[in-house]
Structures are given as structure tokens and as C-alpha cells.
């Protein structure tokens, strides 16, 4: 049994795996980290390994207290990954993006893959059919767009996510919802069209906190799997054991 932990920029997600299947998922805040993991390990005492990918400000030290109980693996760029990293700055590539790319490579062999993670940021990661990781894009996520409009202006209110009535926003609120939500959808559909025009034989994986909201609104039909990062973390760990 394996406990996987994804430390994002907003919150922490975790899942317990038995082989390839998820037994339970958890979401919690950063200040609850130790308490929550302790609780999970009390419930799942058969966990032998704790596998962490962190892009947040939580470092390896925060997990060392659990080393008495199980093996702790804090993934870094030094670990083995199943793709060739062609990023010009491989050491600055987010470990979450590396794990997503690993999951896509292992799960969908021999095809071009585009992973879109709609979280705090939206990240796009492209791995070609020869397993070269080429790069992608980083842009502000949905919540971040609402917050930055408010934080960097005098007159724009902070709104909670809502579907716009139309692309023509007829009030301040509707104009913001249209700009944020439609802008987000157009951006992603635009990127997908660009990739489709340039590559055949490819699969798109959509994940992250906004994946379900987004999937319904895209012109392109793609299926959301909001658990893809944790599943990929489990697979990356199995790959590491087999190839280290
Ligand atoms: N309870 C919640 N707290 C924060 N964001 C939420 C919540 N529910 C849905 N969301 C949506 O999820 C998005 C954040 O995604 P996610 O939770 O995957 O980010 P994260 O934990 O920071 O991970 P990462 O840094 O990997 O993107 C926000 O844009 C927001 O719209
Ligand atoms: C882009 C984020 C914030 C997405 O979580 C993360 O992957 C990160 O901090 N990346 C570092 C920069 C890069 O990936 O090139
Ligand atoms: K993300």
C-alpha cells in the first residue's frame, strides 16, 4: 500500500493506492499536513511507502517525522523518469509537470500526448510519440484570474466562479465572468486546435481542480480525470522501483 501526496500551490491532495487502484482520496490545507497524514497512516497501517511531489513551499523535512513508520520518497529531478527531457532548463521544470508527463508516457505509450492541468496555474505539457518531453505553457488558473483582476485594480470586485450568461458581459460582474471563464475556455480550445493542426495520433489528458468545470465547456471533447496527478505519482514510483 502506498500513500501519494501532491503539494500544490493552493492545497494538498493525497491518495492511498493498493497496486493500481485508489482506496481513498484526501484534500487538505498546508497547515494540516502533519495531522492529516498521521491520521491517514493510522487508518491505513499497511502503507509501506510515502511518495511526495511538492511544488509548494513544503520541503522534505516536513515528512521526515514519518520515516520511523514507512519509507519516504520525496521526488526530485534526480529520480528516473520514463521520458527524455528536452526542456532547455530541465532543473527548473516543476516536479508536478514531470510526474504528469511520466504518467502520460507510461499510460499512453507510442502516441503524442498533451497534458493540461487546470490548477492554481494552467500547465500544458507535451510529450511526443518518441517519448521526448518538449515543454508546453504556463498561464494563470481560473481562481488566480479572478483574484488578480481584483488585487491589481481599484474597482473590480472579487467574484466567486460562475458561468457567464454570454460572451457579451452586460454588467461589471458579467463582464468579469465572461473575461475569466470564456477567456480560460478559449485559451484552452485554442491551444488544443494548435496541437491538433500540428500533430496527429495524439491524446489529451485534462486534470486539476478546475478540470470538471472546464470539460463541459470546451468545444473539443476531452475527458477529465481530476486524479491524474496522484495516479501518475503512483506509477512514477512503480517505475522508479523497477528502474533504479
Ligand atoms: N476548495 C477549493 N479551494 C481552492 N481551489 C478550488 C477549490 N475547489 C475548486 N477549486 C478550483 O481549483 C483550482 C485550483 O486547483 P488545484 O486545487 O488543483 O490547485 P493546487 O492545489 O494549487 O494544485 P497545483 O498547484 O498543482 O495547481 C482553482 O482555480 C479553483 O477554481
Ligand atoms: C507551474 C507550476 C507552478 C504549476 O504547479 C509548477 O509546475 C512550477 O512551479 N514550475 C516551475 C517552472 C516550470 O515548470 O518551468
Ligand atoms: K497545476
Image (tube, grey):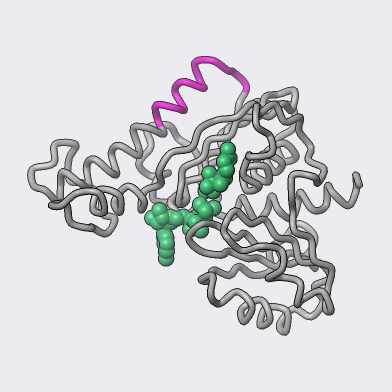
Residue sitting at 29 percent across and 51 percent down?
A: 146
Residue sitting at 45 percent across and 35 percent down?
A: 221
User: In the image, is residue 228 above or below residue 38?
Assistant: above
Within the image, what quadrant is residue 110 found in? top right
Q: Is residue 57 visible?
A: yes
Q: Position of residue 237 (x, y in %)?
A: 79, 53
Task: Give the number of callouts.
Answer: 0
Q: Which residues are magenta?
A: 189-201
Q: Position of residue 198 (x, y in %)?
A: 54, 15
Q: Is residue 207 visible?
A: no
Q: Position of residue 45 (x, y in %)?
A: 79, 80
Q: Nearer the viewer, residue 112 or 31?
A: 31
Most common SS among magenta residues: helix
Q: Position of residue 138 (x, y in %)?
A: 48, 37
Residue sitting at 28 percent across and 39 percent down?
A: 182
Q: Quadrant of the N terminus?
A: bottom right
Within the image, what quadrant is residue 69 found in? bottom right
Residue 127 in magenta stretch: no
Q: Quadrant of ligand 1?
A: bottom left
Left or right: 25, with 18 as reference point: left
Left or right: 221, with 176 as reference point: right
Name of the residue lying farthest toward the left: 170
Left or right: 219, with 169 as reference point: right
Q: Nearer the viewer, residue 102 or 151?
A: 151
Residue sitting at 72 percent across and 70 percent down?
A: 63
Amino acid at each position: 500500500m502506498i500513500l501519494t501526496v501532491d503539494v500544490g500551490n493552493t492545497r494538498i491532495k493525497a491518495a492511498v493506492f493498493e497496486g493500481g487502484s485508489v482506496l481513498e482520496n484526501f484534500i487538505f490545507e498546508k497547515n494540516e499536513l502533519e495531522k492529516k497524514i498521521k491520521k491517514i497512516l493510522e487508518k491505513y497501517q499497511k502503507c509501506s511507502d510515502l511518495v511526495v511531489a511538492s511544488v509548494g513551499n513544503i520541503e522534505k523535512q516536513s515528512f521526515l517525522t514519518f520515516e520511523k513508520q514507512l519509507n519516504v520518497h520525496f521526488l526530485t529531478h534526480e529520480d528516473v523518469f520514463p521520458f527524455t527531457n528536452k526542456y532547455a532548463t530541465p532543473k527548473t521544470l516543476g516536479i508536478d509537470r514531470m510526474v504528469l508527463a511520466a504518467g502520460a508516457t507510461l499510460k499512453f505509450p507510442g502516441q503524442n500526448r498533451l497534458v493540461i492541468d487546470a490548477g492554481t496555474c494552467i500547465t500544458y505539457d507535451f510529450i511526443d510519440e518518441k517519448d521526448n518531453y518538449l515543454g508546453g505553457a504556463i498561464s494563470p488558473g481560473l481562481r488566480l484570474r479572478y483574484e488578480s483582476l481584483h488585487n491589481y485594480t481599484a474597482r473590480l470586485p472579487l467574484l466567486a466562479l460562475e458561468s457567464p450568461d454570454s460572451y457579451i458581459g452586460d454588467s461589471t460582474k458579467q463582464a468579469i465572468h465572461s473575461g475569466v471563464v470564456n477567456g480560460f475556455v478559449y485559451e484552452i480550445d485554442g491551444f488544443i486546435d494548435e496541437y491538433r493542426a500540428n500533430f496527429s495520433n495524439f491524446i489529451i489528458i485534462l486534470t486539476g481542480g478546475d478540470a470538471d468545470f472546464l470539460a463541459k465547456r470546451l468545444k473539443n471533447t476531452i475527458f477529465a480525470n481530476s486524479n491524474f496527478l496522484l495516479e501518475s505519482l503512483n506509477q512514477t514510483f512503480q517505475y522508479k522501483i523497477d528502474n533504479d
